[in-house]
């Protein structure tokens, strides 16, 4: 038997860098350093562990929808151990919202062929946490989301979802979509050998026409959400130091009473 896993990985602006909006109020993805979303490293790790624990032939494909530089995210996932990569890039994707992104990802997953899709719990830039559910709906398969443990056995994906009050053991028959949390297990660092091997692994590039998607279905034109306004956070002002000489608590209460809270 063989198992085809597609891991969706997003290339996100580096949170430690200077991030800003472009003139059209979309996130500027061209002039900022980016990287593989940290939360998607956990998804790659879980795919690798499923492969290592399986007697079946497992093929791991990493898939991203993003600009030219998004190839860096694919290279990182390949150097961790994934087998091949697909990059969907098209100028008309600029401005696409979560619903449009899920359309592009779903069409690419269908074209690639899959038994299991593994996503992160959220991206580290958009952080909506909706794409895995949107994918399951579009693909018409079960979703088992927010797993902190995941395994595959006899055509079934099993996992544990940890909540505040209880842990649930969930399972679904394949094909299915799962998302994994940052509690699912530390993601491995690429080894030198892995980095060298990644250079030779195949990376396919597809555009919208390869996926039979019309430009109007995605981009700002096809988006269901609009950003009306964005302003830079005001610079921090100097803090107030309360020196406690017996009346620190009172001074603190008076200071807080004079503040405006949202
Ligand atoms: C070039 C470009 C321009 C964009 N412009 C806009 C815009 O102007 N306005 C807007 O609202 N959105 C835009 N998007 C889409 C946006 O950045 C998100 O990808 C999308 O809205 C999904 O929301 P999220 O990141 O919160 O995903 P979440 O639902 O938080 O992500 C969950 C998981 O889904 C997967 N995933 C999400 N996005 C991708 C992806 N692109 N590729 C592969 N896997 C993914 C990952 O596994 C991730 O862990 C743009 C995307 C691209 C690539």
Image: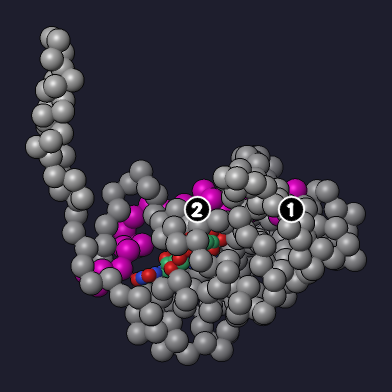
| Residue bounds of the magenta highlight | 23-49
Q: Which residue is mark 2?
A: 37
Q: Residue 169: which disc?
A: 1
- Rendered image coloring scheme: one colour
Relative to 214, say whether 41 is above or below.
above
Q: Residues within 10 Å of mark 2 (few under 14, many from 20)?
A: many
Q: Position of residue 122 (x, y in %)?
A: 51, 57
Residue occupying the point 80% across, 48% down: 52
Residue 171 lies left or right of residue 221; in this view the side is right
| Whole-number angstrom distance, CA of label 2 to CA of label 1 | 27 Å
Instruction: Work out whether residue 150 can be spotted.
Output: yes
Q: Position of residue 185 (x, y in %)?
A: 65, 42
Q: Quadrant of residue 144?
A: bottom right
Compare marks 2 and 1 and give the one earlier in the sequence.
Answer: 2
Residue occupying the point 54% across, 50% down: 39
Instruction: Work out whether residue 4 can be spotted.
Output: no
């Amino acid at each position: 038997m063989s198992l085809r896993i597609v891991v969706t990985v997003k290339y996100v602006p580096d949170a430690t860098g200077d991030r800003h909006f472009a003139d059209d109020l979309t996130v500027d993805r061209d002039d900022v350093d980016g990287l593989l979303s940290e939360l998607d490293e956990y998804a790659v790790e879980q795919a690798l562990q499923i492969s290592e624990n399986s007697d079946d032939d497992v093929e791991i494909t990493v898939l991203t929808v993003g600009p030219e530089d998004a190839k860096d995210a694919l290279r990182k996932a390949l150097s961790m151990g994934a087998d091949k990569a697909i990059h969907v890039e098209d100028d008309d994707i600029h401005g696409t919202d979560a619903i449009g992104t899920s359309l592009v990802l779903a069409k690419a997953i269908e074209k690639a062929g899959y038994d299991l899709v593994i996503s992160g719990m959220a991206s580290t830039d958009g952080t909506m946490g909706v794409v895995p559910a949107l994918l399951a709906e579009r693909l018409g398969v079960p979703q088992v989301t927010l797993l902190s443990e995941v395994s595959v056995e006899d055509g079934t994906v099993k996992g544990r979802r940890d909540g505040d009050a209880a842990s649930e053991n969930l399972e679904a028959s394949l094909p299915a979509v799962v998302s994994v949390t940052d509690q699912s297990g530390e993601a491995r660092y690429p080894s030198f050998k892995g980095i060298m091997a990644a250079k030779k692994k195949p990376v396919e590039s597809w555009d919208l026409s390869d996926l039979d998607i019309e430009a109007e279905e995605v981009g700002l034109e096809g988006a269901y959400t609009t950003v009306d306004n964005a302003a830079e956070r005001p610079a921090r002002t100097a803090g107030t130091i309360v020196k406690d000489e017996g009346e620190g608590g009172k001074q603190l209460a008076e200071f807080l009473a004079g503040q405006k809270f949202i």
